[in-house]
Amino acid sequence: MSIVIRSAGEPDGPMSTTRRIRSALGPTARENRRELEKRHPTIFAGSRLGRATTAAVVVGLLGLLVFALWRLEFSFARIGAGLGQLVHFLTLMVPPSAGTWARLWLFLHSLGETVAIALLGTLAAAVLAFPFGFLAAKNVVAQRVLHFFTRRFLDTIRGVDTLIWALIWINVVGLGPFAGILAIMSSDFGAFGKLFSEAIEAVDRKPIEGIASTGGSRLAEIRFAILPQILPVIAGQVLYYIESNTRSATIIGIVGAGGIGMYLSEAIRTLEWQQVSLLVLMILVTVAVIDQISSRIRFAVIGERRIET
Amino acid sequence: MPTTLPRLPDDRLRPLTEAYASAVRASRLRFLLGLVVFAVVLVVAARFAEVDLVKMANRIGAIGDYVGRLAVFDSGDFVGRPVIVAPGEWMWGLSHWAKLIGDTLLIAYAGTLLGAVAAFFLSFMAARNLGRHPMVRIGVKRLLEFCRTVPELVFALIFVIAFGLGPLPGVLALAIHTAGALGKMFSEVVENIDMKPVEGTTATGGSWWQTVRFAVVPQVAANFASYALLRFEINVRGASVMGFVGAGGIGQDLIEAIRKFYYADVSAILVLIILTVMVIDLATERLRHHLTATEARA
């Protein structure tokens, strides 16, 4: 014990202190391990039931994994061959290049399109989901049935992936970025409806009671008591989604709904690896930039608070 | 007990309203300025994304039309009648689709588990408070960032070419993306632990791995499992579209049905996917509540 106290006060930094303690105490503790075990048998043995449960869970998880890999036709030969191919592709990827300037211009334009899709899709979803958030909130609409059906409706929409929405919208409005906006809008509409209703349910009752006590109408309660409380939360969530939708928007082009995904999938399918690496780099940089901008705005709007998503 | 509040006489009301107006003026101005900037960004974005409101207005009816077509048979004995009248006919491929949905779930499961295991080991190296070398930490952080920023479908596209068609590239793509996403969350959990057990094991001479095993893992295990379950939920959705690029699961049949305009099949597969996602959501939510309850007890 005395070693710890003495060396903790020394000025040469915590890292070297811990290292010294480790080298000084380690051997002593290991020498006496058997004796320690004898003295505190319960601590060393742990609980038998807990261990059995852990073992059972691990065996179950691994068993299911083995079954999954067998069912999905995993084979080490195939993985080995594939890895060899991947390394080969990687060597072909450097240096990243678009080939021609005209192509680079096309890439940049479609990158702008991607960001625009993410922005407009997210905003449209937020605007659409706003009223539904109120409908699905228990403390605004005290109607059990309406509340239940709104929630299930939102769940249904949320269950369909963005890419599926993109395919459906392409059938409706044709190929192009507009279908992408609608796809992002549809899949986020469900998510926003749920998040907004949760934000509304978490508001403080007191301002509502205050408005009611001065004779305010139901609408005035929403405008002056609920809105000021939820707007910062909602703004934070929308900004976060713009950020994550920039990532989703890069892939909807794969099915033809606009953005950089079209060029990316084309480059991969035609094995233009230098273009692939350039496109991936462009996506990485864009996402990082959007990330920075949106977290700046977020902190300005709501302060450094964690966002529940 | 209804009461009416008396309305104040005008001369007493005026100073109050004026005070209110001057108090909100500054914030209103700032709000308006923000709105103008926002409108400009919106217009530029709309130009970029070729938003055409006229076309939208013309096509708005097509949405209802499309949904309507999804709900009726387009061929066979029941052509033109709602799909509900003959569920057996509507779900004619049920056994085939159920098998594919099972595959989709297995892809999501294998991808989540493999990714979570990778994230588990990497997260301790990326955490700021466990004293790994800064170079290692930053390297691992960048790697995780790369894995989660590149969409899983892009990985899938590349892997399909490297490994061939089938569920294998789908699993690998999901695993890599999951490792990136979970690695970040895991390392944040590790950064928020109570450091006293860590000091305790270090003080008794434990190695770095022993410290992780006996001081860190017991604190974070429940949280890790909860995040992994959440990821599984997300990955089920992700796996449902892996088939779009030939990486296994139900997506292959769905994209075919959509592209070939087999409306009744589209709706049948969509209903199956939505039901599966709902069941998985409910089940994982139960499990996560259970986990947080055990964590609270511990």
Image: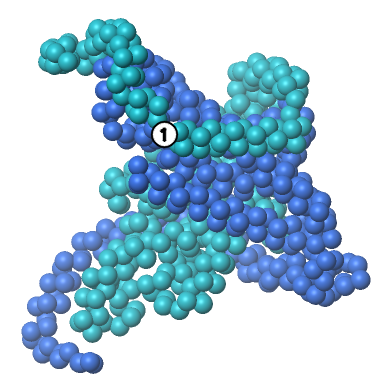
Chain B: give its colour: blue
- Which residue extends farthest front? A38
- From the viewer's perspective, is residue A155 above or below residue B219? below
Name the residue carrying label 1.
A47
Seen in the image, is A17 located left or right of residue A258?
left
Q: Position of residue A88 (x, y in %)?
A: 69, 16
Task: Tell me which corner region of the image, top left, top right, bottom left or bottom right, holds residue B173.
Answer: top right
- From the viewer's perspective, is residue A38 above or below residue A210? above
Task: Tell me which corner region of the image, top left, top right, bottom left or bottom right, holds residue A94.
Answer: top right
Q: Residue, x 27% and y 74% (percent of image)?
A: A208
Chain A: give its colour: cyan
**Which quadrant holds the N terminus of chain A?**
top left
Q: Chain of mark 1?
A: A
Residue B41 in sight: no
Q: Position of residue A212 (x, y in %)?
A: 25, 80
Q: Position of residue A247 (x, y in %)?
A: 54, 42
Q: Secondary structure at mark 1?
A: loop
- From the viewer's perspective, is residue B1 above or below residue B201? below
Q: Between residue A180 and residue B4, name the one nearer to us.
A: B4
Q: Between residue A169 and residue A263, name the one nearer to us.
A: A169
Seen in the image, is A91 located left or right of residue A144?
right
Q: Residue, x 42% and y 69% (percent of image)?
A: A137
Task: Tell me which corner region of the image, top left, top right, bottom left or bottom right, holds residue A58.
Answer: top right
- Identify which amino acid the numbered label 1 is placed on: Ser
Q: Tag count in the figure?
A: 1
Residue A123 in sight: yes
Mark 1 surroundings: few (<14), some (14-19) or many (≥20) residues within 10 A: few
Q: Residue, x 77% and y 55% (percent of image)?
A: B258
Q: Between residue B228 and residue A247, name the one nearer to us.
A: B228
Q: Between residue A10 and residue B78, name the one nearer to us.
A: A10
Q: Position of residue B119 (x, y in %)?
A: 50, 30
Seen in the image, is B105 located left or right of residue B212?
right
